[in-house]
């Protein structure tokens, strides 16, 4: 009801009554699955502050014209009233009959800003202008877009993430005052979209829990040196030891440099990230935070690592898919898999 009533009146209405009124009057219900169509009953329109002033002006002109029998006054009054009626129709049609579709939401770490991708699709033959879109909790809308006839527009809305797990996109408000600003049309949308929030990596975490077992011949498996990570390139390093995958990720503009694979003989190193092996006196969130840091450190050093957490047991591997699976398990530990 805050969209249509002055703030001092809203404060006089009990919260429970406002919640029920919002549910009944403004269709504030559950999640809208899939693509949402803004039908007539989903678009609301009321005069803006400028519209209220314009209506008062028309009323003043009408009273003056009646009292003084002003023909030109009547003409001006009815012309202004006609403009207001046309503005009602145009403002309403600028928002109605649009299709809203959720996009993607990339995973983030707790404390970072989650980005939600949304699409506004206009399948009509009418161009749409000055559509303001944002989360309700943001207050004043920060994003505006135009959507041409038969086209679509993509927007990215941001919301802070405070804790690990699934972060559902907050309710969205779409509004417009086009073309004259005398009226305000708006609608609500609760997209079926969530972002996965990983635990925040622990700062100053202990080194990776490497375990080494000495081999009988002083070498690794099959008489070959064991991979121990990557290091900066040094003159004389063989080309077959170049870490091309890591080199491709480095941007020269950010100080990127050549790196090579580093091997050590005489020991068989194994990296196992075992959640159950961590001290039981540690706080659960701290353990998850430390495991997150170890996963990121192992990936940064290109070290294959096994991951164990309760019933989850991933074999030693590395890469984006392995990292995502481990971080997902950490994010949803004790929370379930939904949505």
Image: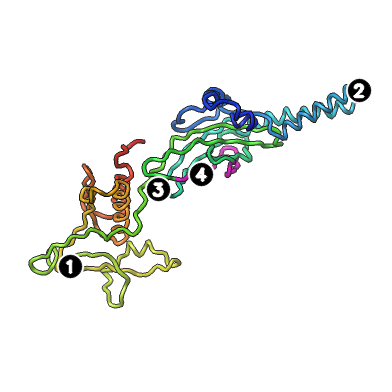
Q: Splitting the image into 4 quarters, where does residue 185 fall? A: top right
Q: CA distance from mark 2 to mark 3?
A: 70 Å
Q: Residue at x 32, y 60 (%)?
A: 300
SS for tag 3?
Answer: loop
Instruction: Answer whether labels 1 and 4 touch (C-beta < 8 Å).
Output: no
Q: Splitting the image into 4 quarters, where does residue 125 fall? A: top right
Question: Which residue range is magenta in the image?
Answer: 140-160
User: Does the magenta run of residues contain 157?
Assistant: yes
Instruction: Answer whether labels 1 and 2 touch (C-beta < 8 Å).
Output: no
Q: CA distance from mark 1 to mark 2?
A: 104 Å
Q: Residue at x 29, y 54 (%)?
A: 295
Q: Nearer the viewer, mark 1 or mark 2?
A: 2
Q: CA distance from mark 1 to mark 3?
A: 39 Å
Q: Splitting the image into 4 quarters, where does residue 302 fall? A: bottom left
Disc 4: which residue: 157
Q: Earlier in the sequence, mark 1 or mark 2?
A: 2
In the rendered image, the quadrant that contains the C terminus is: top left
Tell me if mark 3 has few (under 14), some (14-19) or many (20+) residues whose alpha carbon lies within 10 angstroms of its own. Answer: many
Q: Earlier in the sequence, mark 2 or mark 4?
A: 2
SS for tag 4?
Answer: strand
Q: Residue at x 51, y 33 (%)?
A: 189
Per the rendering, the mark at residue 225 is 1
Disc 3: which residue: 110
In the rendered image, the quadrant that contains the N terminus is: top right
Is 318 on the left or on the right of 37, as rendered? left
Q: Earlier in the sequence, mark 1 or mark 4?
A: 4
Q: CA distance from mark 4 to mark 3?
A: 17 Å
Which of the pair 89/267 is nearer the observer? 267
């Amino acid at each position: 009801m805050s969209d249509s009533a002055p703030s001092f009146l809203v404060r006089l209405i009990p919260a429970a009554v406002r919640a029920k009124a919002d549910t009944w009057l403004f269709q504030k219900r559950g999640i809208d699955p899939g693509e949402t169509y803004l039908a007539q009953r989903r678009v609301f329109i009321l005069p803006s502050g400028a519209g209220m002033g314009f209506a008062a002006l028309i009323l003043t002109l009408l009273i003056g014209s009646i009292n003084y029998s002003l023909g030109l006054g009547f003409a001006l009054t009815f012309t202004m009233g006609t403009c207001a009626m046309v503005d009602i129709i145009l403002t309403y049609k600028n928002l109605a009959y649009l299709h809203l579709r959720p996009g993607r939401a990339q995973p983030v770490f707790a404390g970072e800003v989650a980005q939600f991708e949304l699409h506004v699709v206009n399948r009509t033959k009418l161009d749409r202008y000055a559509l303001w879109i944002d989360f309700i909790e943001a207050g004043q809308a920060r994003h505006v877009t135009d959507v041409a006839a038969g086209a679509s527009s993509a927007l990215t809305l941001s919301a802070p993430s405070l804790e690990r797990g699934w972060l559902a996109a907050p309710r969205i408000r779409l509004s417009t005052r086009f073309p004259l600003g005398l009226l305000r049309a708006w609608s609500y949308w609760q997209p079926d979209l969530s972002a996965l929030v990983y635990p925040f990596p622990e700062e100053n975490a202990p080194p990776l829990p490497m375990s080494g077992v000495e081999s009988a011949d002083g070498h690794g498996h099959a008489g070959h040196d064991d991979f121990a990570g990557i290091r900066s390139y040094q003159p004389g390093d063989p080309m077959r030891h170049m870490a091309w995958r890591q080199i491709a990720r480095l941007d020269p503009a950010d100080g990127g440099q050549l790196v090579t694979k580093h091997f050590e003989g005489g020991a068989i190193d194994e990296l196992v990230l075992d959640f159950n092996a961590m001290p039981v006196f540690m706080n659960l969130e701290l353990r998850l935070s430390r495991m997150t840091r170890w996963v990121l450190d192992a990936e940064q050093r290109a070290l294959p690592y096994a991951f164990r957490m309760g019933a989850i047991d991933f074999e030693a591997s590395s890469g984006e898919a392995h990292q995502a699976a481990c971080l997902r398990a950490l994010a949803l530990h004790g929370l379930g898999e939904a949505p």
